[in-house]
Amino acid sequence: MELIDIIAILITLAALFSYLNHRFIGLPSVIGVMLISLVMSLALIALGHLGVGISAATVGGWMEHIDFSEALLHGMLGFLLFAGALHVNINDLAEKKWEIGTFATLGVVLSTAIVGTALYSIFQALGSPVSFIYCLLFGALISPTDPIAVIGILRKAGVPKSLETKIAGESLFNDGIGVVVFMVLLGFATGGAEITAGKVALIFVEEAVGGVLFGLLLGFAGYHLLKSVDNYSVEILVTLALVMGGYSAAEAVHTSAPLAIVVAGLLIGNYGRQFAMSERTREHLDTFWELVDEILNAVLFVLIGLEVLIVTVSDRSLFGGVIAIPLVLAARFVSVGIPISILKLFRAFTPGAVKVLTWGGLRGGISVALALSLPKGPERDLILTMTYAVVVFSILVQGLTLKKVIARPDGE
């Protein structure tokens, strides 16, 4: 199937599901689109077993033409991160820098260790052992919260401003740390790399620190270009080039492209909007990137819903999915609870912060993309099923009930 045909089908499904959700269901956009996509996928599986209609295998075969990991991590992600960062107040982030930095580093590492160790112990106790390194890989890919899922739902959930800044800020930055941890562990799992403290530190500096510095370079270059012209079509093209060219360039120099685009987006969204754009340009730029954000989010969550068609489900992987959900939530509770308990000695927190941060730590497409990037084998099938179970629960259950959790603060 040609690329243009795949894009046409995805855009058509995204438009249809968005219309159905807006017209008849009324859920938040990403949740509604994913729910309809998931229901359609399950219906195809059921009809296929009954020998009626288009078989799930046929649609699943079509889905295998789409490299989800490549499409998200090296395609849509840059646009989505830039659109999300564009409207985040950099002063609010600076005010919460210690909380965000702690959650995005210590929180991710701690959650990875908790999930990996607990999962390994559970499967060992049941007499169905899984390699410890693959348990840690699952911990690494599932621990970072997804900025794409989080920001879209937070806007509609009524989260207190201070908590919204912490959750959104953490989600924008922690995927960089999670990917670094994931890549180090993957190198060890596939036998292509030796784990040493020096190598881990070097990778962290190259990816995380390098990504931030490269993002600053991109942001300031974009800022000066925008400041030198007053034509909204040219300025929108500059931001497009910043995202597409900047993401590719960051990957070429082996720094974290997601972190680079987040930093560039924050600079353009704050200093660029304030000092380098006319009011007319700001209006057109906001409209353009909001539209890009909505379209790509709709396509992404259609894809997540359809991915169930290529997930290999066995009794073992189904059990893994069931235990992964409470395990990931428990690890999230500990990984935000411990830092908050320490930081509370120096800073004030909103009542119920641990509860809201735990329940509001949504997982999404980035976790699925990382799971799909694993080498094929029984461990990959198990991890993919567990990842999918956590992501679906996260978006549908946590996303739909977050507003109720926020409405009942319990004072930690």
Image (cartoon, helix red, strand yellow):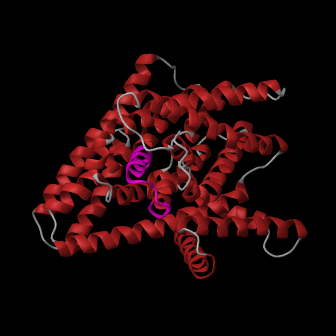
Q: Where 139 falls versus 2 (above or below)?
A: above
Q: Where 375 falls versus 63 (above or below)?
A: above
Answer with the quarter of the image where residue 302 lies: bottom right
Q: Where 34 falls versus 147 (above or below)?
A: below
Does 347 lie within the magenta span? no
Does 165 lie within the magenta span? yes
User: Of 354 and 226, which appears nearest the observer?
Assistant: 354
The secondary structure making up most of the magenta span is: helix
Q: Where 122 falls versus 253 (above or below)?
A: above
User: Of 290 and 25, which appears nearest the observer?
Assistant: 25
User: Of 364 and 347, which appears nearest the observer?
Assistant: 347
Q: Residue furthest bottom?
A: 23
In the image, which residues are magenta? 155-172
Q: Residue sitting at 41 percent across and 40 percent down?
A: 349
Residue 205 point in image, percent of width and height: 34, 29
Residue 309 point in image, percent of width and height: 72, 59
Q: Residue sitting at 90 percent across and 69 percent down?
A: 50
Q: Residue sitting at 34 percent across and 55 percent down?
A: 85
Answer with the quarter of the image where residue 253 lies: top left
Looking at the image, residue 168 sits to the left or right of residue 281; the answer is right
Q: Residue furthest right?
A: 50
Looking at the image, residue 193 sits to the left or right of residue 287; the answer is right
